[in-house]
Amino acid sequence: MAYLPQQVIDEVRSRVDIVDLIADYVSLQPSGENFKGLCPFHQEQTPSFVVSPRKQLFHCFGCGAGGNVFHFLMRYEHLSFPEAVSLLAQRAGIPLPRPSHRPSQEEQRKEIFYQLNTSVTEYYQHLLQHPTLGRRGQEYLRQRGITAQVISTFRLGYAPPRWDTLVKYFVEEQGRSPSLLQTGGLIKPRPQGKGFYDLFRDRIIFPILDLQGRPIAFGGRALESDQLPKYLNSPETPLYKKGEMLYGLYHARQAIRRLGYVLVVEGYFDLLTLWQAGIENVVATLGTSMTRRQAHLLRNYTREIVLVFDGDQAGKAAAFRGNTLLMEAGINVRLLVLPAGTDPDTLIRTQGKEAFLHLLDQALPFIEHLIRHGEHRWNSIQDKLRYIHTLLPLIAKVARPMEQMEYLSLLAEKTRVSEHLLHQELRAYTRARASRGQPSSTLPSSPKPSLPSTVTPNVEKDLIQLMLEDPTLIPRVQKEVSPEEFTDREWGEMACLLFALAEKGVEATPAQIIDLFPRPQLRERASQLLMRQLPLEHRDQLLEGCLSMMRDRRVKREQEKLKALMKAAESRGDFTESTRLLQRFMALQRERKGKEKGEKAGMT
Ligand SMILES: [Zn+2]
C-alpha cells in the first residue's frame, strides 16, 4: 500500500462501481437488493456468489471469497494490491501520481531483468522479421503453418546461428554488463579463453510470459534435426524457476474462465496449432511433467483439466504422475490420448480441428481411463492385485460418492473381483486418509473459523458486524470491551483494527474498512458478515444487548476465578480468605441478578 496515497485509493474505490466491474466477468442476476451469479473462483451449479451494490462488496457463500473491487480484481487477475488499484484507476480515468515508494533492492533487481528480457524478446522478434537474418526462421514457421498473427501474439522470435548475436548487440554495442546477461540465462562464459557465447543459436524463440505478460524466460526450438537438444529452455534465473509457470497461461486465462476447463499439452507447437484452430483454453507444461506449483496455478482458474497426450507409453506414464498431484489439488482430470504416432499439432494439421474436438468429447475421467485401458497391465494374479491397489487410493480421493461407486463397479467388472470386496478395501483407504487428517473431499476448503471452547461466538460476531456497518459505534464498544475478551482470535484481531481506525477518527464505508484487513481470511469473514442482514433500525438495542452479554461473560469468568481461589483457600484451611472470596462472589451474583431484573423491567 506504500505505493499509492490513501486519497487516490479511496477515490478509485469510490469511482468504480462493483456491480459494473464484476458484471464484466460474471453474469449477474438481480436478487433482492443484491446481485447473484456463479462464482468465478470455484466450480458451482447454483449461484452462491453475491454482490452488494449498497455495500460495494462481494462474497461467495460457497468458497468464502470476498472483499471489495480491489480484492475481486486481485483474485481474478492475480494482481497485487497496487496493481489492482492502478488498473482500476485506468478504467475510471483517474491519473495516478508517480510512485513515491522506493522499490526494495529485490524489486529493483527483478525490474532490471524484466527490462532485459523485454529488450531481448524485441530483438529476437526483430531478427525473425529481418529479410536476410531471419529467413531460416521465417521459412521454418511457414512450413509448420504458423500464421503471422500467432507469431505476433506470442511474440515469437529467431536466434540466428551465430555464437554471439546477443553478445554483440547487448554487450558490445549497448555496453550492457555480460554478467547481467549471464545471470539472466542468456549467455555463457566460453570454456576456454575469454569472452561469452549465446545460449540460443539457430532456434525459434518462444518468450515465456508471466501472468502480467512480462517475459521471464525463453524456450528455443532447434531448426536442424541433428541439433540437440530439440528444445532448450532458459536455466533458472532471478525471474524463472522451473515448473512454476505454464506456457501460454497469460494468453489462455480468459478462455479458460469462459469455457470452464483447460487443455494441457506438452509442446509449444501443440499449443500454437490449437490456438490457431480457435482453441484458446490451452497451456503447455514446458517439457516437465505437471508440478504441484503448476497444479495450484491452474486451480486458480478452473478445476477441470483435460490432459492431452500422444498415444505412446511415455505419455501415459507422465499423465499418471501428474494426475495424482492434480487430484490432490482438488482438480477433476480427464485424459485425451491421441492415436499412436500423432500429437495435437499433426492431428489438427492432417485431420482438422473437428477430429480433435471429437476426441475431446470422448476424453474419459482419468480413473475411468485407467480402469478401461488397464487390462494390459496384468499378466498374473499378483499383477492384478498390485494394479487394484494402485487404483483404490485414487478412487478414495474422488469427492463424489456416486462417482466413486461407478468406478468401483467398473473396476469389479474389469478385474472380476467382487464389488463388495473392493468396497471393503476402499473403506480401508478412506479410513487411513481420514486418520492422517487429510480432507476426504476435494470441495474448496474455506478457512475454518477457530471455534471457542465454551461460548458461542454469536455475540462477538454481532458486535463486529455492528461496528463494520456503522463505524460511529466503534468508540462505544471500545469503551467497554477489550480485544482480548473475544474468544475467537480473528474477531479479536478485527476488533483491534477497528479500534485503531476509530482512534484515528476516520469515518469509513464497509468497502473502505475491508481494505484495513491485511489477511484474506479476515477480509472474507468480514465480507460474509456484511452480507447478513442485521435489523439496523434496532441498532442501539442490538448494541446494548451485545455489550451486556459481554459484561455478563466477564462477570462469569471472574466468578469462575473466585471459585477456584475459594477451593484452594479451603483446602489450605484458610477459611477467612474463603469467606472473603465468597462474599465477593455473592456480590457479583447479585449484580448479575439485579441487572437481569433491571433489563426485564426496562423492557416492559
Ligand atoms: Zn466461490
Image: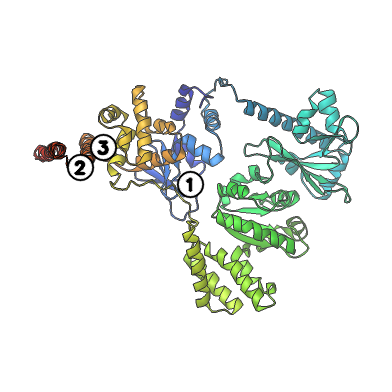
Q: Residue at x 89, y 51 (%)?
A: 226
In the image, residue 520 above or below residue 195: below
Disc on res. 572: 2
What amino acid type is highlighted by mark number 3? Leu
The scheme the figure's colours follow is rainbow
Instruction: Identify which residue, 405 or 491, lies in the foreground.
Output: 491
Q: Residue at x 59, y 65 (%)?
A: 367
Q: Disc 1 or 3, which lies upstream in sequence?
A: 1
What amino acid type is highlighted by mark number 2? Arg
Q: Disc 1 or 2, which lies upstream in sequence?
A: 1
Q: Which residue is mark 1?
A: 27
Q: Position of residue 142 (x, y in %)?
A: 82, 47
Disc on res. 504: none
- Compared across the picture, whether 448 is left or right of 173 comes to left
**In what element is the residue under mark 2?**
helix
Q: Is residue 436 visible?
A: yes
Q: Position of residue 331 (x, y in %)?
A: 56, 55
Q: Position of residue 391 (x, y in %)?
A: 59, 67
Q: Residue at x 45, y 26 (%)?
A: 10
Residue at mark 3 to residue at mark 2: CA–CA distance? 53 Å
Q: Position of residue 448 (x, y in %)?
A: 41, 48
